[in-house]
Image (cartoon, rainbow, N blue to C red):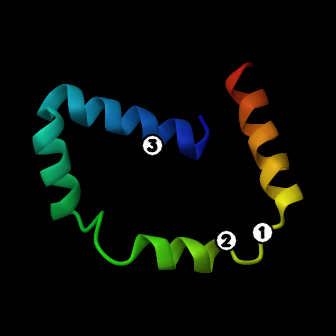
Amino acid sequence: MTPIELREKGYQVLVKELGQVDTIRFLQEMGWGFGDYTKERQQSLKNVTREQFWSDIETIRKEKNQ
């Protein structure tokens, strides 16, 4: 299972067991959703080229279709 698939499954389980509102509350309690997401994302992706990005997308699609 890829990290993205794991995250998606985790969210699905949380929503199924807690409902949407309480899932959001839980994630906020765990510290997810705080900070400046845009700034952090720009920093983490500043050295990623367009070619690397599309290569990663292609890899994810291939893994998902297997």
Identified by mark 3, the residue type is Arg
Three-letter residue code for mark 2: Leu
Residue 7's disc is 3
Dot placed on the residue nearer the N-terminal end, 3 or 2: 3
Count neighbours of disc 2 (C-alpha within 10 A) and say few if under 14, some if 14 to 19, many if 20 or more.
Answer: few
In the structure shown, which secondary structural element does the residue marked by tag 1 occupy? loop
For the N terminus, the image quarter is top right
Q: Residue at x 72, y 19 (%)?
A: 65
Residue found 79% across the figure and 39% down from its top: 59
**CB under 8 Å between callouts 1 and 2?**
yes
12 to the left or right of 57 = left
Tell me where residue 51 appears, x and y as whole percent.
89, 57
Within 10 Å of disc 3 (Cα), the crowding (few <14, some 14-19, many 20+) is: few
Distance in Å between CA atoms under marks 3 and 2:
20 Å
Residue at horizontal 83 percent and vertical 60 percent from the top: 50
At which x and y percent is residue 7?
A: 45, 43
* Pointer 2 residue: 45
Numbered label attached to residue 48: 1
Side of 3 where 66 appears, left or right: right
Quadrant the C terminus occupies: top right
Q: Is residue 9 above or below residue 21?
A: above
User: At numbered mark 3, what does the secondary structure look like: helix, strand or loop?
Assistant: helix
Q: Which amino acid type is shown beneath numbered disc 1?
A: Val
Residue 37, quarter of the rendered image:
bottom left
